[in-house]
Amino acid sequence: MVIEESIVIHAPMDKVWKTFTNLTCWKKWNTVMENICSEEKSLSRGVQISCSFRPVLFPVKAAIKIEEVTPYKCIVWSTQKKGFFARNIFTFQSNKKGVMVTSRENFNGLVVKVFGFLFPKKKMRTLIQTFLKDIKTASENLTDK
């Protein structure tokens, strides 16, 4: 299952990038992930993030590993758990209106094939859209204080 969503954020690239990569602020704006924990303060290659999210009624714990960070261009992360694998590529593109952030998430594994109802495509798309909207709201409201 592949889900791709984009959003235009009306803010400069540096603000969007700072919002996305500063893990110390995620709890303030991120409504999709709960119990966010990392030993690091910002996203960089090799960083681990533990969190949970709710694709259905019960929370699913995830251990996210940051695979790649190309400043102001791309962030790739993945998670793997007993027959489930997800990889998300976030791209950042400046345009006349601000920054377009695109999320392309690929879900694979036996759990997805056999128990797809646990990760319904419509619900997963909604979670990704909400995450992008959260980034948009936080980036557009971020001040230089």
Image (tube, rainbow, N blue to C red):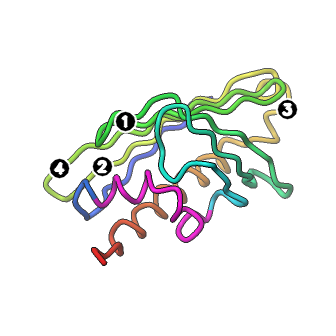
Q: Is residue 62 magenta?
A: no
Q: Earlier in the sequence, mark 1 or mark 3?
A: 1
Percent position (x, y) of residue 87? 58, 30
Question: Which residue matches tag 3?
Answer: 115
Relative to 44, is 70 on the left or the right? left
Say which mark, if any, is on residue 74: 1
Work out whether residue 55 or residue 142 is closer to the camera in this orientation and state it.
142
* Image quadrant containing the C terminus: bottom left
Magenta span covers which residues? 15-31
Say which mark, if any, is on residue 95: 4
Question: Which residue matches tag 2?
Answer: 100
**Residue at image x 81%, y 21%?**
110
Q: Splitting the image into 4 quarters, where does residue 92 fall?
A: top left
- What secondary structure is found at the residue carrying circle 1? strand
**Mark pair 3, 4: CA separation:** 40 Å
Q: Earlier in the sequence, mark 2 or mark 1?
A: 1
**Mark pair 2, 1: CA separation:** 12 Å
Counting the numbered discs, the total is 4
